[in-house]
Image: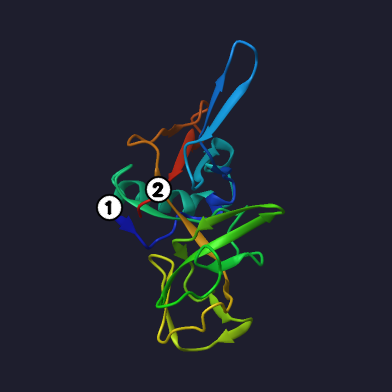
Amino acid sequence: MPFLESPRFPDEIAAWAIGGRGFSTTVVETYGGIEYRNAAWSQARGAWEIRNEALRSNNPVSPYSMQALRTLYRCAFGQLYAFRFKDYLDYQDENGGVLGTTGLAVAATLSYQMFKNYVLSPLSYQQMVQKPVAGTVKVYIQGVLQVSGYTLDTTTGIVTFGSQPTVGNTLTWTGQFDVPVRFASDVPTMGLEMTGALWEWEMLKLVEVRNP
């Protein structure tokens, strides 16, 4: 699917976003009030809204950013192209960065997907990281920083080692990451405010894509 690695959604506007990554749960309730719940997704999917307070021309950060946003909307052909978005509520490893779902080296494996591990003992959840931010990621084996011996694909979040890490050694990472998203509509809601003095974008919605 088409994806724009650059430019990223304007950070100045992204900082106003409301939302985050969530789940889809099917809940069946019987006449007796007993519930049966089933998780439809194994990976959370994000959705965000940016309301008009952030998208008015009298917002100090808006004039340049709004032009960049309008250009991104046109060049992305509305919903067609996905792009990078910084979720200000969750964009760093926070000591949860692991390679592979277990964070351990396994036999005959050189390439590992980046994940962020969220732990609330005895429960845990691993979020796939597909869009790490170039220049921010550091890789560790058994807690030792690796300055060479691996490559990082910032378009997929896959780390590939040049030689087999010792089986059972911990594989971790630190750094920042973006979320792959698209616009949720093909038609923008831009126009003049009721006074005619300002222009605004009434509502903007973004949704995460799983196959960037």
Q: Position of residue 39 (x, y in %)?
A: 52, 37
Cβ atoms under marks 2 and 1 closer than 8 Å: yes
Q: Position of residue 144 (x, y in %)?
A: 62, 85
Identify the image quadrant of the C terminus: bottom left
User: What residue is disc 1 on?
Assistant: 1
Q: Quadrant of residue 117?
A: bottom right
Which of the two labelled residues, at mark 2 and mark 1, occupies the earlier sequence position?
1
Q: Which mark is residue 209?
A: 2
Taking the spot 45% from the left edge, 42% from the top edge, the residue there is 206
Q: Is residue 76 above or below residue 29?
A: below
Q: Residue furthest bottom?
A: 148
Viewer-closest of 147 and 59:
147
Drawn side of residue 155 relative to residue 53, left or right: left
User: Can the viewer see residue 201 in this picture?
Assistant: no
Q: Residue furthest top?
A: 31
Q: Position of residue 76 (x, y in %)?
A: 31, 49
- Label 1's element? loop
